[in-house]
Amino acid sequence: MSGRGKRKAKPWSSRSQSKRAGLQFPVSRVHRYLKKGHYAVRISPSAAVYLASVLQYLSAEVLEAAGYVTQAKGYHRIMPRHILLGIKCDDELHKLFNQVTIPQGGVPPRIEKPLLIKKPNKKSASRKRASPC
């Protein structure tokens, strides 16, 4: 026989590390940056998988929080302001991104208590807007 019917099994290396780990973030790129940064003498390949999965999880959490704010405001596109408000509404994300500045994000809305003027109630006919938090 000439060997036409025989096929070689595809080796595991033909699949990317991200596919093998079930991630969307690039594991090989994270591994390259870890090696390039000289953070340690040796970098384990599993360290890149772990770091890529953590980055993917954090980005999913931030986008989910920003998506809720976007829906509450009635927009269809996530903007930097929505990312900022989403982070500030979530306690754990707020702790993590406490010292982070988001460009074009503005500041969280807040009015000091002494500056608020008490108005007499007039049948409370005013429409209140839904808070994103």
Image: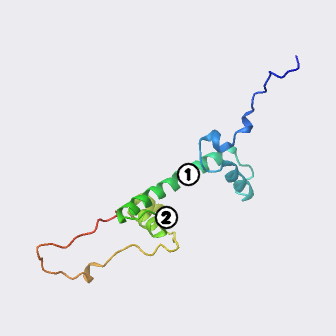
Name the residue: 75% across, 31% down: 10
- Between the C-alphas of marks 1 and 2, the distance is 16 Å
Where's residue 61, x and y in %? 47, 54
- Element type at mark 1: helix
Question: In the image, what residue type sits under mark 2?
Answer: Phe
Question: In the image, what residue type sits under mark 1?
Answer: Gln
**Mark 1, residue position:** 56
Above-or-below relation of 6 to 114: above
Above-or-below relation of 70 to 17: below
Name the image quarter holding the C terminus: bottom left
Mark 2: few, some, or many residues within 10 Å (few <14, many ≥20)? some
Question: CB under 8 Å between callouts 1 and 2?
Answer: no
- Element type at mark 2: loop
Where's residue 28, x and y in %? 70, 49
Quarter of the image where one finds residue 75: bottom left
Front-lying residue, 37 or 108 = 108
Quarter of the image where one finds residue 9: top right
Mark 1: few, some, or many residues within 10 Å (few <14, many ≥20)? some
Q: Is residue 20 left or right of residue 69?
A: right
**Mark 2, residue position:** 97
Name the image quarter holding the N terminus: top right
Q: Earlier in the sequence, mark 1 or mark 2?
A: 1
Quarter of the image where one finds residue 70: bottom left
In the displayed image of the protein, which residue is found farthest to the right?
Answer: 2
Name the residue: 31% across, 78% down: 111
Identify the mark at residue 29; answer none if there is no mark: none
Where's residue 57, x and y in %? 52, 51
